[in-house]
Each structure stands twice: as structure tokens, then as C-alpha cells.
Image (cartoon, rainbow, N blue to C red):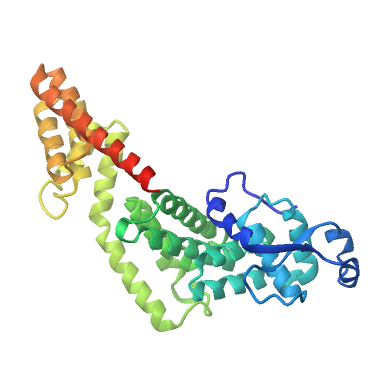
Amino acid sequence: MSEVRNEDRISKYLSPRIQSMMFAELSPDYLSRTGALEILSGVAVPVGIEGNDARGETDLKNIVLNMGRVIGADPYFVFAEKYVEFIKHATGENAAPMLVSEGAHAADMGDFEDACMLLRGALRIDPKSKEALYLYARVCKEIYEAEAQDGLGDEEKTGLFKAESSETFELLTMIHPDFAMGYYFLGYAYLNMGLYLKAKLTWQDFLKHSAGSEMETHEMDDQLLASLREEISERVEELEEPVEIELGCNKIMGGDFAGGRDTLARFKEGRYSEWWPLWYYLGIAESSLANADAAIEAFKRVLRLSPSNIDAMDELVHLYEATGDTVNAEKYRKKIGIINRNLEEEKNDSRTIN
């Protein structure tokens, strides 16, 4: 029995492609000749794509690839298990590699959704395939980056494909811990999530597994590998201070308010002084230590850097209420109300346009 994840976050974006496919039952004679009578009897199979120059010919490879697309687009498709069984029957050990190869070709041609379906189909056949996991994670990355370009895409789609990509890179490094390139991209995924310590440790794993005999020689040429190692070495060095800031924030979230404050205080001047989360967590620490004035100043600094930051405004409301300053408490309460109304109007406008 092949594996299907209980939750599939992106199939809703891929399954509409199935609607353009033509399905038909293959003749008993053809099924007998291919030894698939017991598997596909009474089963409609995807024989082509609408709009293509279909001449009525039954091409085994195309049927297998289209089946791969279907099970990749919709894991719960009514004939999914039959398709998996037939693909394995028809192509044997070449099943997953063939789908991976076609997925890589689709990606090279810029059709990332088609690539996504084919690679997911390959993973349905072989959930541990290194090549399928790696290319699938990269294709999801291409899709969410394209969606996020210029900030005009679908935010939900961007987030779901981003999560799918990062989790697949994580899975890749767990199943194939010696594969260096998994760590390379996973490090950037962590960096984009603001997980600096994880990014640093992941890139250190890349440097470890891409060194000398640790690296699979066929992965890339020496010049490119040297360039990537130099790039990541610089990144690891650049992360020293962000990692310290993250550790300070983690201390505060863990209840060590004085320790976290002292760690973050070292960065109040310099290159990270314009990073609003630094001041937000300083504000949380000072507030928890009953230093109201210092906390208020920190949260105001947040608002100078991030003017619509509701969380900082909410903290100011609580601080002013606690100190008896009802005027300023009401001032920030009104600002929160205005921002929330504006956000709601933007959502309604977006629904109207869509």
C-alpha cells in the first residue's frame, strides 16, 4: 500500500489540472496484452490532455505519466491506488525515476505545476526517493517565490507552498543525511523564517557534508561546489550576531527576562538597532521586570520602525492602564481600532475584486 499524507496542503492548487485530461477505459484486448486486465478492468485512465493533437493512439508511456500527474495532483483520486499498481506493473523499478525525469524536464520548461504533480506522483511510488524529494522541494520553492513576487500573488498559496518546500527539505535531510544540497536550501528556508540558529547549524551541516569525500562526486562540478561553500561560510559568519539576538529573544520567551534583556541590550546600538523585534522583546522583558518607563520607550521604538504594529500598541495600552495614564491608553486603543478597521476594509475589497 503506498503512503498518502493525512493532510495535503497544496492539492487544491494542482487538482484543477486534472479537469483538462481525457479519461477512457482501455479495451480488454489491450489490457490482456499488457497484463493489466485485473488491475484496470472497469477503471477509467487518463489517455491524453484536452486540446492536444490526440489521434486515438494508446501510448503506454503517456498513460503512465498522466497517471503520475493524477495521483500527484489529487492523492485521494478515486482510482489512485489502481494507478499506482499499474505504474509499478508497467514500469517496474523505473517507475519513480521516469516520473522524476519528466518532472525535471517540466521544471526546466518552466511548467512548475506540472513538475510538481509528476514529482508528487514519484513520491507516491517511492516516498524516500532522494531525487524526487529534492526536486519537489525546489519546485515548491519556485512556485511560492513566483507567487510572492512584487507582493501581488495569493498569500495563502505562497504560505502553503513555502511550508511544503521547507518541510520537504527537512524530510530530505532526515532520510538522506549525507546529501549536502538538502542542507543548503533548508538553511535559506530557516533564514527566511527568522530561525537564525537553525540556519547556522543547518549550514554547518552543509559545509560538513560538502567537504571532500563526504560529497557525492556526481552532484556538481568542483568550481560550483567551491563557490557554494564560500557563500555559505560567509553566511555562517554573518549569522553570529543574529543568533545571539535570537537566543536573547528565546530567553525572554522562556521567562528569563533579566538574562534576555542583558543579551539584547548589547545590540541597542549598531547595525541591528533598526530591527523592530529587538525592541519588542526588550519591551516585553522590561515590562515583565516592572520597568514601565523602559518598556514604554521600547514599544514606542517599535512603532517608529513598524508604525502599524498592533502587538506593540496593545502592550502600550496595558502599560498605560497599569500606570494610570488613561489618556495614552485610550490613544493607542483608538489606533488599534483604526488599523483593524482598515485591515477589514482591505479584506472586503479583496473579496470584491476576486
Residue drawn 53% across the image and 80% down it: 218
- In percent of width and height, residue 5 lies at 62, 48
- The quarter of the picture where residue 54 lies is bottom right
- In percent of width and height, residue 349 lies at 32, 43
For this rendering, which residue is in front, 330 or 320? 330
> Is residue 207 shown above or below 292?
below
Can residue 289 be seen from the camera position used here?
no
Can residue 170 be seen from the camera position used here?
yes
- The quarter of the picture where residue 271 lies is bottom left
- In percent of width and height, residue 187 lies at 39, 59
Residue extending farthest to the top is: 324
Does 204 sit left or right of 171 as displayed?
left
- In percent of width and height, residue 105 lies at 56, 76
- The quarter of the picture where residue 324 lies is top left
Residue drawn 58% across the image and 56% down it: 16
For this rendering, which residue is in front, 349 or 185? 349
For this rendering, which residue is in front, 6 or 175? 6
> Is residue 323 shown above or below 1?
above
Count of number-bearing discs:
0
> Is residue 213 shown above or below 206?
below
Residue drawn 53% across the image and 60% down it: 172
